[in-house]
Amino acid sequence: MKAGVTGLHHITCIAGDPQENLDFYAGVMGMRLVKRSVNQDAPTTYHLFYADALGNAGTDLTFFPWPEMGPGRRGTGLTVEIALAIPPGSIPWWQQRLVESRAMIGEPVERFGERVLPVTGPHGLRLALTETADSRDFAPWSGGSVPAEMQVRGLHGVRLWERPIEPTARFLIEALGFNARVKTEERWHRYELGAGTSGQFLELCEVPEERRGAWGVGSVHHVAWRVPDDAAQLRVQGMVQAAGQHPTPVIDRFWFKSVYFKEPGGALFEVATDGPGFGVDEPLESLGSHLVLPPWLESRRGLIEAALPVLRDPV
Ligand code: ZN
């Protein structure tokens, strides 16, 4: 069996106002809010998870809404764009839908043979809706306003700015198991996993003239990569260490287990197990409908709920 990660697991970003975040990702993008929780390190702020109907690994985009933080600074050592998979031929439909929302959209472009619609979300996060027919675990969500045949299928890839790219490129291959073969188009170098089914791409651009990026509203906080089980996670943890980086111990996030580390360019990565999944602490039918807290915060539920802004269902 090939060691390394098998694809994107989830991506966590920093948002502004949580209601605007919910209105865009659940309301406009039609993703399912599969978990309504809090930042485990700062429990008076939400942690909102959007995914497919079942919260399959590889479909999940999550947000810490921190409106008081100020905008992020686009720069090196950060993930600067997230590609989401949409069905082939669906770009015109999405263009029309997004024009009517708070999102800014660019002209459709072709990248690495794929049709891409660039979108800037309500708080500045850059998305690339990418038409793809790749096979993936995806369950359409019937509770939203986007028809099943147009829905976002999950995560497709990420783009990072680096100065220089070589240490990160070597790390992807040695520590995470990316293929050594790279495709290049304009200034972007595409690295591919090829071992799994979805979320297989990471693209690097060398921008030595740019400043270091900084977290803030509209930026990507971290990118999590999938492993099938605990044993695979420990193997990757060892490979990360052998490549000279500094992984954390395994942290139990209940829905999955996590190991965090920085890649050589400075972007925060995570390796997360596919299971047990979002159904472990609430029924699949009612995922996301009420606030879920880790056990050690349950005794403070009243205080936490009082401190969190009330969210209404998206329009
Ligand atoms: Zn994470």
Image (spheres, rainbow, N blue to C red):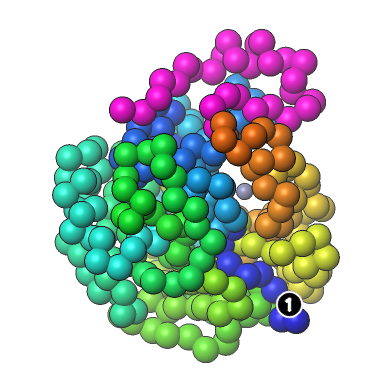
Q: Secondary structure at mark 1?
A: loop
The residue at the far bottom in this view is: 181
Whether residue 277 is visible to the viewer of this picture, yes or no, is yes
Whether residue 67 is visible to the viewer of this picture, yes or no, is no
Q: Quadrant of residue 82?
A: bottom left
Quarter of the image where the N terminus is located? bottom right
The correct choice, above or below, for 233 with respect to 214 in the image is below
Please state which of residues 60 and 46 is positioned toward the viewer in this rendering. Answer: 60
- Residue at image coords 22%, 46%: 98
Residue stretch in magenta = 288-315
- Residue at image coords 66%, 33%: 282
Q: Quadrant of residue 71?
A: top left
The correct choice, above or below, for 143 with respect to 239 in the image is above
- Residue at image coords 64%, 62%: 226
User: In the image, residue 169 lies at what x, y percent?
Assistant: 56, 77
Please state which of residues 192 and 123 is positioned toward the viewer in this rendering. Answer: 192
| Number of numbered labels in the structure image | 1
Residue 14 lies left or right of residue 145; in this view the side is right
The correct choice, above or below, for 150 with respect to 134 in the image is above
Residue 151 lies left or right of residue 167; in this view the side is left
Quarter of the image where the C terminus is located? top left
Q: Is ligand 1 within 8 Å of the beta carbon of the residue shown at mark 1?
A: no
Mark 1 highlights which residue?
3
Crowding around mark 1 (Cα neighbors within 10 Å: few <14, some 14 to 19, many 20+) is some
User: In the image, residue 287 lies at what x, y percent?
Assistant: 57, 34
Residue 246 lies left or right of residue 43; in this view the side is right
User: In the image, residue 244 lies at what x, y percent?
Assistant: 74, 70
Q: Quadrant of residue 241?
A: bottom right
Callout 1, which amino acid? Answer: Ala
Please state which of residues 283 and 70 is positioned toward the viewer in this rendering. Answer: 283
Whether residue 305 is in magenta: the answer is yes
- Residue at image coords 24%, 66%: 89
